[in-house]
Image (cartoon, helix red, strand yellow):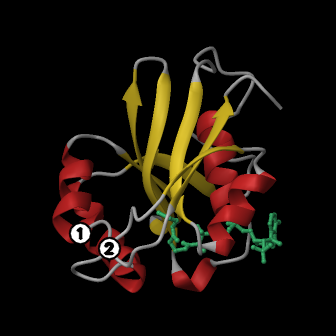
Amino acid sequence: MNLQGNGFVIRRAFSDDEAQLEFIRSFYFGPFLSWSREDLKSQVERGQVWVLTSEECILAYLSDREVGDDIEVLSLAVSPRHLQRGLMEKLMSELYFDQNKAACQGSVFLEVHEKNQRAIRLYERLNFVLIGRRPVYYSDGGAALVFKRDRRSG
Ligand SMILES: CC(C)(COP(=O)(O)OP(=O)(O)OC[C@H]1O[C@@H](n2cnc3c(N)ncnc32)[C@H](O)[C@@H]1OP(=O)(O)O)[C@@H](O)C(=O)NCCC(=O)NCCS
């Protein structure tokens, strides 16, 4: 999958990507917090991880799973050197909301810590709608906000 000639490629991750993925994951998520190294490894093995690359360097990743017609986003992160370039917006738009794709049906669901303002801004920019709140969801006692966007909506 190519992104409009700007050198970015979106593809599934494979086991050779694990070191680069782990570099990004461990920058944000500690060994006991949220998604672990083992979680990410098994998501790669199950074919649940997408990467956005430039010259085989992973700039961002996202893991998800299909639940019927719907998609549940499990985890996502942008390489610390490549934040605030709109790369996650590109990755999510291309994967889920490209209206030219026949598979554009169902909804995308995700959860985010109530204090993760940067991620919340990203989801709102992508027209996700807040549909629920799960109190005391994370290990620090924080609530999870649940967002949804229909894949056909603009
Ligand atoms: C959440 C996260 C993925 C957002 O990454 P990001 O780089 O800020 O998001 P985007 O790739 O969409 O970039 C958007 C930002 O780039 C800026 N930007 C610069 N050039 C841009 C362009 N051409 N197009 C769009 N946005 C651009 C936007 O203004 C925006 O900045 P803002 O957030 O200050 O408003 C990132 O902060 C991250 O990896 N966090 C750690 C992991 C995490 O919290 N994951 C979520 C829970 S699992």
Residue type, numbered disc 2: Ser
Q: Which residue is mark 1?
A: 36
In front of the other: 37 or 141? 141
Question: Does residue 126 appear left or right of residue 45 in this picture?
Answer: right
In front of the other: 148 or 23? 148
Tell me: residue 149, above or below residue 14: above
Q: Secondary structure at mark 1?
A: loop
Residue 20 locus on image (x, y percent): 34, 73
Residue name at image x 63 percent, y 60 percent? 88
Q: Specify which label sits upstream in the sequence, 1 or 2.
A: 1
**What is the CA distance from the residue labelled 1 to the residue labelled 2?**
14 Å
Residue 50 locus on image (x, y percent): 43, 49
Q: Which mark is residue 139?
A: 2
Residue 78 locus on image (x, y percent): 54, 71
Q: Quadrant of residue 28?
A: bottom left
Q: Which residue, as the protein is rendered here, is positioned at the far front? A: 135
Question: Does residue 18 appear left or right of residue 107 in this picture?
Answer: left
Residue 7 in view, yes or no: no
Tell me: residue 151, above or below residue 148: above
Residue type, numbered disc 1: Ser
Residue name at image x 61 percent, y 18 percent? 105
Q: Nearer the viewer, mark 1 or mark 2?
A: 2
Q: Secondary structure at mark 2?
A: loop
* Mark 2 nearby-residue class (10 Å; few <14, some 14–19, many ≥20): few
In front of the other: 151 or 103? 151
